[in-house]
Amino acid sequence: MNIIQQIEREQMDAVLAKRRVPEFQPGDTVKVMVRVVESADVDPKDKKKKAAAARAPAERLQAYEGIVIARAGAGINESFTVRKISYGEGVERVFPIYSPHIAEIEVIRRGRVRRAKLYYLRGLRGKAARIFERTDARARKLNAAWKGFKKPKGEADDLSQINGIDAMLAARLKQLNLYKFEQVANFSDEDIGNVEGALNIDGRIEKQDWIGQARALLTAAEAPAEGEGDAQA
């Protein structure tokens, strides 16, 4: 491995540490969550608001859902093309797989095709452009992969209070319906394996003791409540 390949590998690992890349191919329907950074419209005469907007640009996630019609390249240069129909017109976007501007790639449906490039869909409309769903053993295995926890009740806790979880990782955990200290505190070995596999963070949960930190935060949150009850009594 030369120095260029090593640098590319490091950049790919940095992206994989923040999000996973699911297995998909041409013919599959995917939803790509793209990070869009927007600057607020501020009166140029208002210097305070202008400075605040410059310090904290607004960021939102934009969903783009369509059929993958091609994959090209390899390594950090690998990309895929997604086509959708918007207001009767075909729209295509090319996404680099390891782009830092992609927050998540979700496979919605797996299609059964015989070609690696589906450019012929550009000339088809309606039922003629329909792709049948893939239902073989491999597709069933991929669809049965773990996708997250059952949504818990109550408001979300601030998981970034746990050392090792930043705001970005907390957002990715929330996509798995994991946003309560109680959930982290009650992790089983299977839960740890599922979370680390889904987010590609092998070993971090035990190494950084997320479970112990979550239990300590729960205990600290319960202590003031008990003190208030004693004072009222």
Image (cartoon, rainbow, N blue to C red):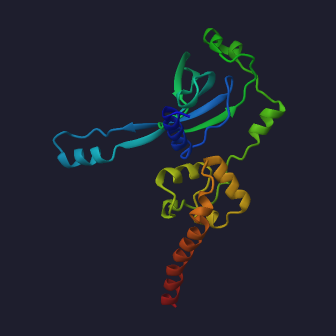
Question: Percent from the top left, x then y, of residue 222?
Answer: 55, 77
Q: Is residue 59 above or below residue 207?
A: above
Question: Percent from the top left, x then y, of residue 141?
Answer: 79, 38
Of residue 183 and residue 79, the one placed in the foreground of this image is: 79
Along the horizontal axis of the image, is 53 left or right of 18?
Answer: left
Along the horizontal axis of the image, is 218 left or right of 148?
Answer: left
Question: Percent from the top left, x then y, of residue 228?
Answer: 49, 84
At a point 60% along the width and 42% down the height, the residue shown is 20
Quadrant housing residue 134? top right
At a point 23% along the width and 47% down the height, the residue shown is 51
Along the horizontal axis of the image, is 169 left or right of 206?
Answer: left
Q: How many marks?
A: 0
Along the horizontal axis of the image, is 42 left or right of 110?
Answer: left
At a point 49% along the width and 60% down the height, the residue shown is 160
Residue at the right extreme?
Answer: 137
- For the N terminus, the image quarter is top right
Q: Is residue 211 above or below residue 28?
A: below
Of residue 153 and residue 30, the one placed in the foreground of this image is: 30
Residue at the bottom extreme?
Answer: 233
At a point 69% along the width and 52% down the height, the residue shown is 194
Q: Is residue 163 above or below residue 69?
A: below
**Can residue 226 be seen in the rendering of this structure?**
yes
**Can residue 102 be seen in the rendering of this structure?**
no
